[in-house]
Amino acid sequence: MSTFVLEGLRPWVIQRVSAVYIALFLLYLLYSAVTAHSVDFDTWRGWLFQPLNSVSMALFVLAILFHAWIGMRDVVLDYVHNIMLRILVLALIIGTLLGSGLWAFRALLLTVTG
Amino acid sequence: MRARQRPVYLNLFQIRQPITAMVSLAHRVSGVLLFLAIPYAAYLLGLSVTSSEAFTSVIGLLQQPWPKLLGLAVIWGLAHHLFAGIRFLLIDADIGVQKPSAILGAWLVIVAEIIVVAVSGVGFWL
């Protein structure tokens, strides 16, 4: 259960490790965008087709999900004190994150299968 | 026991916050803003890879006035969250903990994010 609840030092570590990865990936994404020959569909798909790019992007999505969950959870625990409302808000957040994450993974999968 | 009448004054909007507190609060606000942008970003990512026409429509959408303004808000959130986050990581490493350096760090975050937003804004509208 503690794997899901993320108690103690674990969320603190995950938050920082994911933050560093997100920052590095965004830097790489910015570099790729600036050095791209042109902004068009084929270049974009070609970039995503590279194994390093699609895998690091999938890892980026995963890092965002963890980072956003821990961050939003902390905010909710600080400001929402009513237990029922808290459960509702946390459920909405996790639903939004999982939905968005699966949506992004589906898109990434599409770029490698064609 | 009778409740003692103690002066409680915790209206955060009436207390003048130091710059370090403002940067810290903005880190939270920008984090929530970025969370709200996640579904939209996932939707646009999905659209951008489906077809050439869809890709063009995403680029076209991002050039509309309101989405552009929203995009600039997200860029502010990203810039602030990133720079303030780096500052917090440095504070974890005992760098910038003392009052003068903590205040300097907070100002550096603000200067850096203003530069990013200004450059992006110019790039968007010129």
Image (spheres, coloured by chain):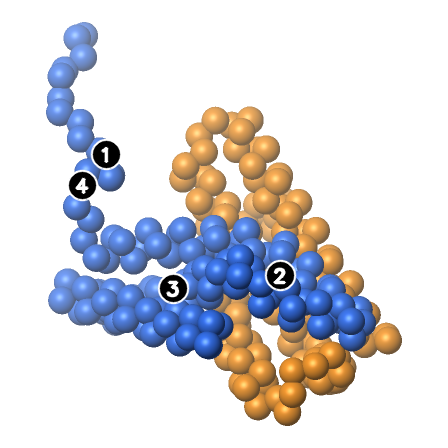
Residue B18 x, y percent position in the rendering:
18, 53
Q: What x and y, as percent, mark residue B3?
A: 18, 12
For label 4, the SS is loop
Q: Which of B49 and A9 is in front in this view?
A: B49
Q: What element carries label 2?
A: helix
- Element type at mark 3: helix
Which chain wears blue? B
> Residue B55 at what x, y percent from top left?
72, 71
Q: What residue type is labelled 4?
A: Ile
**Circle 1/circle 3 CB separation < 8 Å:** no
Residue sitting nearer the eye, B89 or A6: B89
Count neighbours of disc 4 (C-alpha within 10 A) and say few if under 14, some if 14 to 19, many if 20 or more: few
Under mark 2, the amino acid is: Ala
Please tell me the colour of chain A. Answer: orange
B4 versus A77 height, above or below: above
Q: Mark 2 points at which residue?
A: B41
Q: Distance between the residues labelled 2 and 1?
A: 36 Å
Task: Tell me which numbered mark, 1 or 3, is placed earlier along the sequence.
Answer: 1
Report the side of B107 relative to A30 (left or right).
Answer: left
Report if residue B90 is visible in the image. Answer: no
Residue at image mark 1: B11
* Quarter of image, res B2: top left
